[in-house]
Structures are given as C-alpha cells and as structure tokens.
Amino acid sequence: MRPVRALRVYLDPMHALVLAVALVLPLHGKTVVIDPGHNGANWSHPAEINRLVDAGGFRKACDTTGTSTSDGYTEAGYNFDVALRLARILRHDGATVVLTRTSNDGVGPCIDERAAIGNRAHADAAISIHADGGPSGGRGFHVIYKPNAPESRRLALDVRQAFAPATGEPYSTYTGHDGLDVRTDLGGLNRSTVPKVLIETANMRNAEDARLLESPAYRQREASGLARGLERFLS
C-alpha cells in the first residue's frame, strides 16, 4: 500500500488573508438586519402610528406602542436594548449590521418601511425583536415566520434551537406550537423579500418572564442566543 502524501495548498497573500479573516470572523461578508419592534415615542404620536400602510395585500396600522411589564418597563425600550447587544456580538463576528431604528426616542418606522430596510440591504437574514403582552398566566417564547417561505422557516428553526438553551426560556405555553408560529397578518414579515423572522422572546405580562427581562445579564444571554441562531443559519 502506497503511503498517502499530504496535499499542499499554496495561497497567494491576498487569498491567505481572506481565508484568515473568514476563520476568525465567522460572519464576514454577511449582512444582518435587526428590527427592534415599536419605538419609545410611538405613544405620543397616535395619528402617525395609526396611519394605514400596505401590510402585504391588506392595510394595517403603521405601528403600535407595544406592551410593558407591570413595573412599567416598556417593550420598546427592551427591544432596543436587546437589539444593541445583538448588534455588538454580530459585528464582533464580522457581520455588517443594519438597525431599522437607532434610538428609542423616535416614532416608527412603519412596518412596511421596516421590511423595506431589510430588502434594500439585501440582508442575508433579518430578525424582528419583540416581547409579548399575553395572558399573565402564560410564559415562554415563540418564533414567527410567514407561510410558504422555506428560508424563513429554516431561520426560525435555527433561532429557536439556539435561543432555548442560551436562556432557559420555555416554549410559549399559550400560543404557537413547540416555540414556532406561522402568521399571515404581520406586515413586517409579509413585505420582506429576505429571510426574516419575528421572535416574541417572552411574555411581559407574566411575572416570572418580566423579572428575567428586566435583568441586563439575562438580556445579554438572550442576545447571545439570538446571535448563535443567526450564525447557525448563515453558516
């Protein structure tokens, strides 16, 4: 039996640099759009956020105010905090990150524009971050995608698979099935032409979930879990 010779591959300096970057930065060359739901000043501009826009074949309000915990911690503020934490992780891993809003003291953007931002960026993946205002007796998270969108479904599965162990949060006990839900009424998903999901990370109206969401350390764990799910999808 002949001895097996090692295969030598010679790379010019530029290709070697590209390979080194790819090994160190797993998301190099990928674009991710992060959509923190709602906005901090939506409540004070009812005419704007109630304006009807195209939600994908039907008309729907531009946006809503979102919910809050019983302590007054707003969903808009929570969504934005987790989005910033997630953006830092993804950028550290080499991704180009686009946020649909860059502060929590503005209005909107409308759901159709949130989708358009991802479309214009030709995002490899997009994720909308929310927390639910469900029944106080229910808790848990679920990931939503639109029907007949196989890449979005694959993204939903990868996010679900990474988020659960990173946070210890159970699948939603009051909606969806096994941590997943399919909906046709969400304009931000309907209008997206790139793989996009919406995650309801927990139920703000549930005391146990609310306690977790108000913890910065827990929000960091959520961001880490979301990052690992996106990385799984993009790899």
Image (cartoon, grey):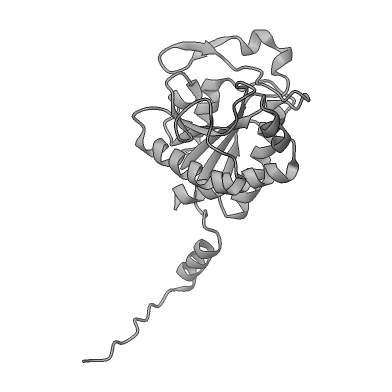
- Position above or below: 18 against 163: below
Image location of residue 99, percent across then percent down:
61, 36
Image location of residue 3, percent across then percent down:
27, 91
Quadrant for the N terminus in the image: bottom left
- Position above or below: 125 against 76: below
Query: Which of these two is toward me, 193 or 86?
Result: 86
Residue in the picture at 65% in, 21% down: 66
Q: Can residue 102 be seen in this view?
A: no
Residue in the picture at 57% in, 54% down: 94
Residue 62 horizontal side relative to residue 208, left or right: left
Residue in the picture at 46% in, 45% down: 158
Question: For residue 64, which quarter of the picture?
Answer: top right
Image location of residue 31, percent across then percent down:
51, 44
Residue in the picture at 49% in, 41% down: 160
Image location of residue 105, percent across then percent down:
75, 25
- Position above or below: 145 against 111: below
The residue sitting at the left extreme is 1
